Image (cartoon, rainbow, N blue to C red):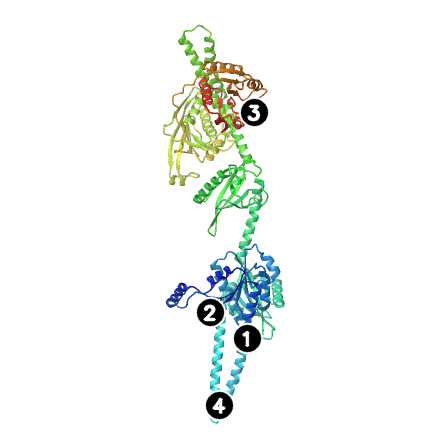
Amino acid sequence: MKTSHSNFNRRILVIDDNHAIHDDFRKILGEPDAEDAALDEAEARLFGASQSMLFDIDTASQGEEGLQKVQQAIVEGRPYAMAFVDVRMPPGWDGIETTQRLWKICPDLQVVICTAFADCSWNEMRSQIGSVDRLLILKKPFDTVEILQMASALTQKWLLLQESRLKLDGLEQMVSERTRELEQSQAAAVSMMGDAVRNREKAEQACEDLRREMAERRHLEEKFREQASLLDKAQEAILVHDLDSRVTYWNKGAEKLYGWSMEEAMGQPVGQLLHKDAAAFHQASEQVIQTGEWIGELCQSHKQGHSLAIEGHWTLVRDDAGNPQSVFAINTDITARKKTDEALEMQGEVLESMAEGVVVCDEAGQIVFSNAACNAMFGYDNGELLGQHFSVLKRSAPDEGRREVDTLWTLLMERGAWTGEIDSRKKDGMTFITRARVSVLENAGVSSFILVVEDITEKKSMESQFLRSQRMEIVGRLSSGIAHDMNNILTPIILSASMLRLPLPPEDFGKLLGNIESSAQRGAALIKQLLTLGCEAGGQRKVVTTTGLVDDMLQIMLGTFPKNINISARIPEEVWPMMGDATQLHQVLLNLCVNARDAMPMGGVLTLSAENIRFDDSYAAMTAGIKPGPYVMLRVADTGEGIPSDLKEKIFDPFFTTKETGKGTGLGLSTVLGIVKSHSGFVNLRSLMGTGTTFEICLPAAPDAKADTLAGPAPVPPRGQGETILVVDDEANIRDVLRKTLAAHGYHVLTAGDGTEAVVLFSEHRDKIKAVLTDIMMPYMDGVTMVRTMRKMAPFTKIVASTGMGSARGREDKTAALHSLGVKTLLTKPYTADEVLLTIGELLAEPEEALAA
């Protein structure tokens, strides 16, 4: 099937064993349907010649058939300009062999091999075919525009080569011959004109011959100008030089690329004009003389002296006798591409040499690049992470990790960048903490994300140890006040206990018991505050109520600060909660309050206050590191001596202190500043000598966060129905009180002094025991081991654990172990009788299925 729409050669042969491919090429390159033809005709009437470019399409199903068609086309004088050849065409020749056979009979045929890249690599094709100046690769699936561009460019290239070869080879000779003939004709005409009288007819014939010859000469000159104009329109630099390397043709593209005009370049040695590397130029010239062509890259120079990287395709031009005549060169500027390649190579080397881990992900979160530092940090081999989702590097479960990554991507598209800490996971499952800086990359309309990650596990551990040691320093500075307050707590307990041995009226007896209970609760609250200071910061940001934070500080100060310091607080009920690490925020306030106490050795007023405040865009723009939004302003004010102006800029420096040796390390305020900044807040200082000092702590608020609701009336503990409860504690007093308390409320009680004794009792009475109340820290066998042993005997036994441990790490380890054994309730000592009874009642009311959940 054939369609012809052009006066010049746009014949294309499609060789493919798939007839559907034939149809696709006809649709793209062949004759349009009636509707498209009508549109082209209308466009031609309105705007002149139609821009549609149509091609003469032939098809063949095998390489042998294609070879026959090419031979037939040559015989008919209608050769093909180009061919699209499939790389795989069983059972016959493949695309490479077909191409080689086609070029043997038609060397100028432009060939496009169609492949999916997996069929055959470019290097393999080049090694088998050799010269590749007539060969292009088209990747499947096809793109219509790409096929049209290839067909247009390659048929035009074929046409240019044919016309250039014909014209450049023969034009000069033809012009010379015609000039000589015209001179001869002119001489003959003059002779004939002299004999005109004798032979007028001959004279007239001579004049006619002269006019005809002149017209032919003008026609040849016009064709030459057209050919030169066509070459001048090419974007590439096209030049011709003779075998002495002197320039004989220089198009507009060459003028633009090299800066030399045609007049300046003509006749110049091309080696001296353009080539910095003479050896490379001579090697390329020798190859084109020996083989007929050269394709490669060279370093050339501009008129102004700077270097150019070019990709050249040089062809040897021969005369009619087959002798070498000149070199036809097409040079393309690839300087920008080479610089880009070098920059990319350098960037790759930089990324690989970075100590931080670098990960690049596409929009779907798939990893497309990871450097050596990242692979080592997460325990993967080079290339092993490619194609995996970024969530494999996160500590959370895969589904949750994907959701978190999607959320992060959404945030990045809004803000462009993000910095923060990520709980990460190595290939072997080990977890650690990384700090990540994430940015958006845009390339040709495609977004990707680059993450620079740093392992900060050791740094976080050292920070935690430093903060804990600094809190211990504060506790040490409060030690005298703590001892004083504990003595005040213990004194009424001891005195009341002595009085209880005397015969007293019932009302006095009740008052003494109330004194003991209130003093014990006061001591428990003080110990709880000290344990909070002593524990390690968890690092998790949770809702922290401002009123609760200030109340805790008031309890510590009222119990430990000197009585000559008047402590007051002004906290409105509507003050917002904050998101933060409660332990660290306790540390901030306590540091400032202790400093305020030390600033008033003779007494004074210490005021804690808080208020809601909103910063708008204008204020945020004037204050470094502040974002607009809601904040809580905490103030710690004293009426001390104040801070001298020359020291205000130094007080936040690490190890700076005005106190005597042994009275302070100078780390308190630097710690305050570090914690506040880590919470995205800031610190202000206002101080006047003789008036006092006020520290303002601004922390981001969480107005919409839900704080704990106020507790309602205390529930009445339920009574037991004779259920057997096993109480395990190495403290005899605790066992005795618990036994009496539970028995008084309707329970049957068994007691054990350690885990070993408890296991023996449990094995004897496990059918009767409905619940176990056990301490965690005990001699011989601790609570965790005891529970593990009991679970083997009775998996669904209901168990409550209790502890007086204050260390967060120790408690977390034990709690995690107990939780894995199904123990979900933990009582913290000291506890009240009501707390024990309510806990036991709630536990017994739970169905056994809850333990298995």
Q: Nearer the viewer, residue 303 or 169?
A: 169
- Mark 2, residues whose alpha carbon is within 10 Å: few (<14), some, or many (≥20)? few
**In-image side of 92 versus 745 (left or right):** right
Q: Which residue does the numbered mark 3 point to in the structure image?
A: 792
Instruction: Give the SS element for disc 3.
Output: helix
Q: Earlier in the sequence, mark 4 or mark 2?
A: 2
Sequence-earlier tag: 4 or 1: 1
Q: Amino acid at mark 3?
A: Lys
Task: Tell me the SS state at disc 4.
Answer: helix
Q: Is residue 774 above or below residue 274?
A: above
The residue where tag 4 is placed is 202
Dot placed on the residue nearer the N-terminal end, 3 or 1: 1
Tell me the amino acid under the disc marked 2.
Ser
The disc labelled 1 sits on which kind of residue? Gly
CB under 8 Å between discs 4 and 1 = no
CA separation in Å, label 4 and label 2: 44 Å
Mark 3 vs 4: CB contact within 8 A:
no
Front position in the image: 178 or 279: 178
**Marks 3/4: CA–CA distance:** 134 Å
Which badge, 2 or 3, is on the more N-terminal residue? 2
Q: Comparing marks 1 and 2, which lies closer to the viewer?
A: 2
User: CA separation, marks 1 and 2?
Assistant: 26 Å
Q: Is residue 822 visible?
A: yes
- Graded by Cα atoms within 10 Å as few (under 14), some (14 to 19) or many (20 or more), the crowding at tag 1 reads some
| Mark 3 / mark 4, whichever is N-terminal | 4
Residue at mark 4 to residue at mark 1: CA–CA distance: 32 Å
- Is residue 739 toward the left or the right of residue 607 in the image? right
From the image, state whether disc 4 or disc 2 is nearer to you: 2
The residue pinned by badge 1 equals 170
Residue 6, numbered label: 2
Q: Residue furthest top?
A: 503
